[in-house]
Image: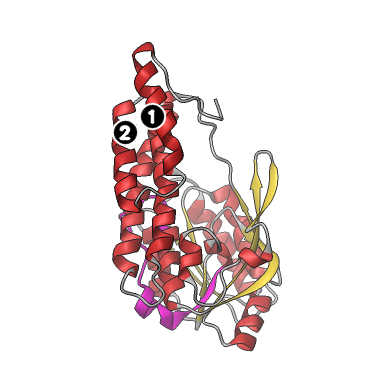
Amino acid sequence: MIIPTFNRAEHLHASVESVLAQTYRPLELVVVDDGSSDDTPAAMAALEASATQAGVTTRFLRKENGGCASARNLGLQNATGEWIAFLDDDDRWLPEKLAMQLAKLAESGASACCCMARKVIQRGEIIQPPTPDRLVQGHEPGKFLDGRSDAHLITIVFRRDLLAKVGEFDTSLRVSSDTEWIARLCHVAEFCAVPEVLAVYEWNPNALSRVEDLQAELRRDEVRKRQLMLIRQRCASLPGWDEAAWKRRAAKQYDEMVKHHLYVGDRKAAQQAYAEGMQLTGGLEPLQRLRRKLLKAKLLGPFGWRLKHPKL
């Protein structure tokens, strides 16, 4: 089990303890400190003793800061178990997670397993995916690409020998490296699923209340656009590739990109993103519905018009 961590000393304890509380044994835990500047080294030292008492084999590693993808990769390089799973340093598992998933894997003969997760947000809690039938199952990567199925990284358990086909996380992606990696995994693995909530993660985004925040969102869009193209580049030759599903995903992402440009009043960039998205997807929805907004931006742009952000 691999946990990357960075400056989360106050949260790491709960995450690691949820691993130590797993009813499944034998268990190996690899924690990778991605160059933290807080009290993470001391927290890891204390947790290592707890892990030993719990009968869990540990590898607590430290590296220079390079991002979550590089920390997960170092964890992969040091993990020795037949099955691998990931957990983030501020999330946690329910005690029966691994036992239930590994039992399902043994029963089904699949090479990867996912489950549902409870997502804690500012306005309450939601379940991801919302219903069990939306969990990734079998070998239908197109459903993951266009959002008909889903699996959060911290819910996945997969057979180690798949790494030879799926590869490591892309360290050039500062965000969304997990989504790109899961897309590859969906193309090489046969999935089964446990239709229960067995993982909990917290998501506390900052409200987009300033132009600077929207500019940060635009920078993330550029990374997500590269992620989108990498998915096609790396998966198009793999079994089960669904070009139509990829285009549906692209249409949704470009729809968001265009809106982000309109939020900051950059009509030229919005029009450029719209044209690019239309060319890539052949004009799929929801891009088509943006025509009216773009026309309004053109007509009212000289008067300072911009699309109103729903969070502002």
Task: Indicate the position of residue 218 as horizontal and vertical percent values.
Answer: 37, 37
Report whether 293 appears left or right of 278.
Answer: right
Image: 58 above or below 213: below
Please say whether residue 68 is visible from this viewpoint.
no
- The quarter holding residue 23 reads bottom right
Kindly check if marks 1 and 2 are in contact, taking CB atoms under 8 A apart as contact. yes
Asked whether residue 117 appears in the rendered view, the answer is yes
Tell me the magenta residue range. Answer: 156-177
Q: Quadrant of residue 188?
A: bottom left
The kind of residue on which mark 1 rests is Leu
Q: Badge 1, how many Cα within 10 Å: few under 14, some, many 20+?
A: many
Q: In which quarter of the image is the C terminus?
A: top right
Dot 2 amino acid type: Gln
Residue furthest out toward the top: 303
| Residue at left offset 53%, top offset 59% | 44
Q: Let me know if residue 258 is in the magenta part.
A: no
Q: Distance between the residues labelled 1 and 2?
A: 7 Å
Q: Where is residue 310 in the image (x, y as percent from the top left)?
A: 55, 30
Vertical placement of residue 175 versus 22, above or below: above
Residue holding disc 2:
271
Q: Which of 247 and 295 is in front in this view?
A: 295
- Front residue of 300/200: it is 300
SS under mark 2: helix
Report whether 279 appears left or right of 260: left
Q: Name the residue under label 1.
A: 294
Instruction: Name the secondary structure under disc 1.
Output: helix
Total residue callouts: 2
